[in-house]
Image (spheres, grey):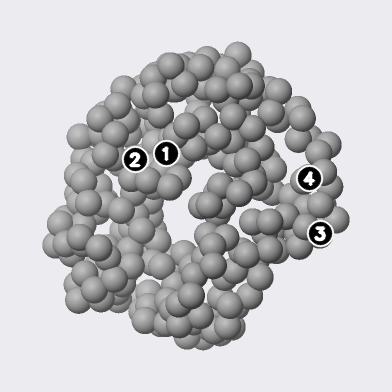
Amino acid sequence: MPNDLWNKLVSELAELHVRASHFAFGLFNEPTLDPQLLPRINQLIAALPHQKIAINTSGKIMLTALARELNSQLHNIAFTFCGYDAASYERNTIGGHFDRIRENILSLVNLPGRRFDVRVSVVTTRETVGKLEAVRQLFPRACVGYSLLMNRCAALSNFADIVPGEPRPSWCNVTPMEDLIIDSDGTVLLCCQDWMREVPLGNLRKESIAEIRYRHQNSKLRRLLETGQRDQIVSCTKCMHADESWRDGRGL
C-alpha cells in the first residue's frame, strides 16, 4: 500500500476511535515481504494504542525480532501449514522448505516472555484429515487447528479433488459487513474470500472509511445477507467449502 494511502487509513481510523478485536496484516499477499511492516505497525499502535495486531503469514521469513519488539501488542501470528510432515508440506507448498518454516515457528513458540498466540492453521485437504496430532507433535505449545479450505469465490476446476467430502456452498450471515477488508490499492471489499475482487464496497482513494461504512449500513448488499439471498451476490454464488462430515471422529 502506498504511503499516502496508508497514512490516510491510519488517520481516519484514529479519528473514528475504531475499536476492533484486532487489526490483521495479510490478505492476499505475504505481509512479511513489506519492508515497511514494522514501522507501519508501530504507526498504527501509536494512533490506536489499545488495539492488538495479528499477522497472517506463510512463515518463510523469520519474525523473531519483530515479535520481540511488538510482544505486548500482538494478538497472534498465524501460519498457514499445507501438510502434516516434511514430505507433504514441501509437496503442497511452492518454494516450501520444511526445516526453515519449522524453525521459524518454534522460534516464536519458545520466545521468552511471549504474550501472543502462535497459531498453526492446517489447511484441510483429503491428505491432512486425521493428521492434526502429527502437526501438534511438530509444533508443541503452538495453537494447532484446521483451517477450512475454501475456493476463495473462484471457479477452481480441481477443488472437488482436494477437499474432503463434497464441496458445499458457503452461506455467510451479515458478519462480512462488520469487517473492514482493505486491499493494498485502497479497495474495500465485502469479504476476505473475494479474491477476484468482484464485490467492492468502495475505495479509500475516493472516499473516507466513514462514508463507505455509512453507505453500506442499510445497503442492498446488507439486506441480501440479512435475508439469506446470497444467490444475488456474485462472489457468494461461487463461494464453496467442503462439508464438515469429515470431522466426525476422524479429523479432531
Q: Quadrant of residue 65?
A: top left
Q: CA distance from mark 2 to mark 1?
A: 6 Å
> Which amino acid does the dot numbered 4 rest on?
Arg
Badge 1 marks a residue whose secondary structure is strand
For residue 187, side relative to residue 217 (left or right): left
Marks 2,1: beta carbons within 8 A: yes
Q: CA distance from mark 4 to mark 2?
A: 30 Å
Q: Which residue is identified by label 4? A: 222
Q: Amino acid at mark 2?
A: Pro
User: Mark 3 and mark 1 in contact (Cβ < 8 Å)?
Assistant: no
Q: How many marks?
A: 4
Residue for badge 3: 229
Disc 2 is placed on an element classified as helix
Task: Examine the rendering and report whether any part of residue 97 can be seen.
Answer: yes
Q: Nearer the viewer, residue 4 or 111?
A: 4
In the picture, which quadrant includes the N terminus?
top left
**Earlier residue among tags 1 and 3:** 1
Q: Is tag 2's residue or tag 3's residue first in the polypeptide sequence? A: 2
Asked if the residue at tag 4 contacts the one at tag 1, i.e. Cβ–Cβ closer than 8 Å, the answer is no
Separation of residues labelled 1 and 4 (CA atoms):
25 Å
> On the image, numbered disc 2 is attached to which residue?
31
Place residue 217 in its image quadrant: top right
Q: Earlier in the sequence, mark 1 or mark 4?
A: 1
Q: Which residue is mark 1?
A: 25
Q: Are marks 4 and 2 in contact (CB under 8 Å)?
A: no
Look at label 3 and name its amino acid: Gln
Residue 18 at what x, y percent from top left? 61, 25
Q: CA distance from mark 1 to mark 3?
A: 30 Å
Q: CA distance from mark 4 to mark 3?
A: 10 Å
